Amino acid sequence: MVDAIEVTVNGLGVRVAVGTTAAAAVISAGAACRRSLMGESRAPLCGMGVCFECRATVDGVQHTRTCQVVCRNGMVITTDAA
Amino acid sequence: MPREERCRILIVGAGPAGIAAAWAAAETVDSVVVLDDNPAPGGQIWRGEENRWTARLRGCGAHVWNGTQAIAVLDGGSLLAARDGEPLVFRFERLIIATGARELFLPFPGWTMPGVTGAGGLQALVHGGLPIAGKRIVVAGSGPLLLAVAAHLAKRGAIIQAIAEQVPLRNLVRFAAQLWRVPGKLAQALDLQWTLRGVPHLKEAWPLAAHGDDRLKEVTLRTRTGVRRFACDYLACGFGLIPNTELAALAGCDLRGGFVEVDEWQQTTARDVLCSGEPTGIGGVDRSVVEGRIAGYVAAGRRNVAEKLFGERRRVHAFSAALARCFALRDELRHLADDETIVCRCEDVKLKNAVEYRSARAARLHGRCGMGACQGRICGPALQFMLDWADPSGRARPPLFPATMTTLAAVVEEESTHV
C-alpha cells in the first residue's frame, strides 16, 4: 500500500492509507465500535459525526467519534465491542 | 478564560454553502472565520476532495478551523466552540449558518446491526478510506442520493446487489423530466445510469428487516413482486435529507415547516444571523453554493452584488420543489419498526416504550428517548415521521454537542462576565 501508516485496533496492527479515518480502520480490522446499553454491538451509521455510534477510545480519549478523526501513525484505538 | 478569536464574519460549516459564503465575503472583508466539525473542509459532498471551491477557500484569506464543534451561542455576538475538548470563544459581527443536512434514518428490525449504515453514511466511510472492493451492497431508501452512492461504490469495485427506491417509477420519470433545467444534472444522471447498468433498480421497494448475528448477512426487501432476500455485507440506507437546524434555533432564528426562515438576502429572523444551504431547504450543492454566495456578499455589505444571483437562486429553488414532490415518503414507511425495534439507539429505547408518550418532550423527560449522545438527532426526526409528534427542532438547547466540563465551564464564565 502506497503511503500506508500503521494503527492499532484492539491490540492488532492495521495498515491503512494516509487520510483514513479511525472509523474506517476499525471496520477494516473487523471490529465494531461501542456496546449499547443492552449490550448490542454498534458500528458507524451516519459517517458524518452526528449519530455517535462510532465512539471508541482513541489515544486514551474516551467517547471519540472515530468517523471524525483521521488516523495518525501509531494511533491506538480501543473499542468496547470486538 | 477560554481562548478568544475575533472576526467580522463567522461562518459555521465548511460545506458548499459555507465555502461559497467565505469566498464571497472574503473578497472585501479581511476577517472571515469558518469553523467546521469535520477533519477537512468540503462538507459531506466534497469530503476530502480537491476541487475549484476547496481551492478557492484555501486562497481567499478566510481562516478555517477544522475539527471544531459549535457548542453554544452566547450573548453579545459570540459563539462557544470546542476543539479537542478545549473551549474557544469566537466573537463576530455577523454569523452565517451553513450547517448542512443529515440523513433521515427510519427504524426497522435489525437496523442497529453493524453493517447497516446510512446511504451517504457508507459513502462518507468509503471517502474516509474504508475498502469496499468486492463487498456486496444493498442500497435502499429514497432520493437521488441512492444512485449517486451506488455509482460511487460500484466505481470502487463494490458489487451492488440491488437499489431499492420507495417511490414509484412515475415519480422518478417526473423527476428526470425536469433535470434539463439545471445545467449538468442530466449528463450526471446519464452517467449514473451507465455506471449502474445491470444493477436491479427496484421501485416501490424498501427494507423490511436486516438479518445476521452480530453483523449483517442478509436483507429482506419489500418489492412489487413480493418479499425478496439479498445476501450483503452492507445495507446503505437513507430516506432523504433533513436539515441541521439546531444551531439556527439556538441562535434565535425562527423555523417554518422545519426549515430556517430567511428573506431574499438569506437573512434569518435573528439580527445579524444569515443562513444558507440545506437548513433553508433541501436542494443539493447548487442551491447551497448560490445561497452561500448571496449570504457572503450580504454579510460583507454588498447587496448590489448579491442581487445579481437572485435569478440563479430561483432556478435551483425549482429543483428543490421537484425533489420534495417526487421523493415524498410513503405511509407504509411509518410502520417498518415492530414493538421490539430499538428507535433511540443511544438509550436503547424500543418502539413499544416510545409509543407510550405523546411528544418528543415527554418521551425525553420520562422515557430517556432522545436523551443520549446524539441528542435526538437520529430518533427525533424518525419518530416525528412515524408517530406524528410535533416538530421538536425549534427548541434546541445548549450544549449543541456533548462537551467537556472545561468547555461547559466557559459558558458559565462568559455569561457571568457579560450580564
Image: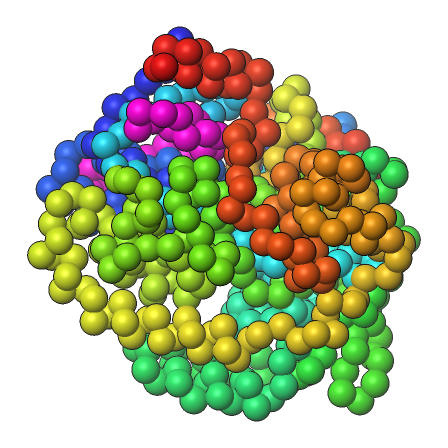
Quadrant for the N terminus of chain B in the image: top left
Q: Which residue sits at x=79%, y=75%?
A: B221
Q: Which residue sits at x=33%, y=18%?
A: B4
Q: Residue B92 versus residue B52: which sits nearer the camera?
A: B92
Rendering coords of residue B26 (x, y %) = 18, 42
Could you tell me how many numbered marks the image carries? Answer: 0
Rendering coords of residue A3 (x, y %) = 50, 41
Say whether residue A12 is visible: no
Q: Which residue sits at x=64%, y=40%?
A: B374
Rendering coords of residue B413 (x, y %) = 44, 11
Q: Which residue sits at x=29%, y=74%?
A: B315
> Does the magenta segment cover residue B178?
no
Q: Residue A14 versus residue B91: which sits nearer the camera?
A: B91
Rendering coords of residue A62 (x, y %) = 67, 24
Quadrant for the C terminus of chain B in the image: top left
**Figure check: B100 above or below B328:** above
**Figure check: A66 above or below B197:** above
> Does the magenta segment cover residue B54?
yes
Say whether residue B334 is visible: yes
Residue B202 quadrant? bottom right
**Span of residues in magenta:** B52-81
Going by the image, does B248 lie left or right of A32? left
Going by the image, does B275 lie left or right of B29? right
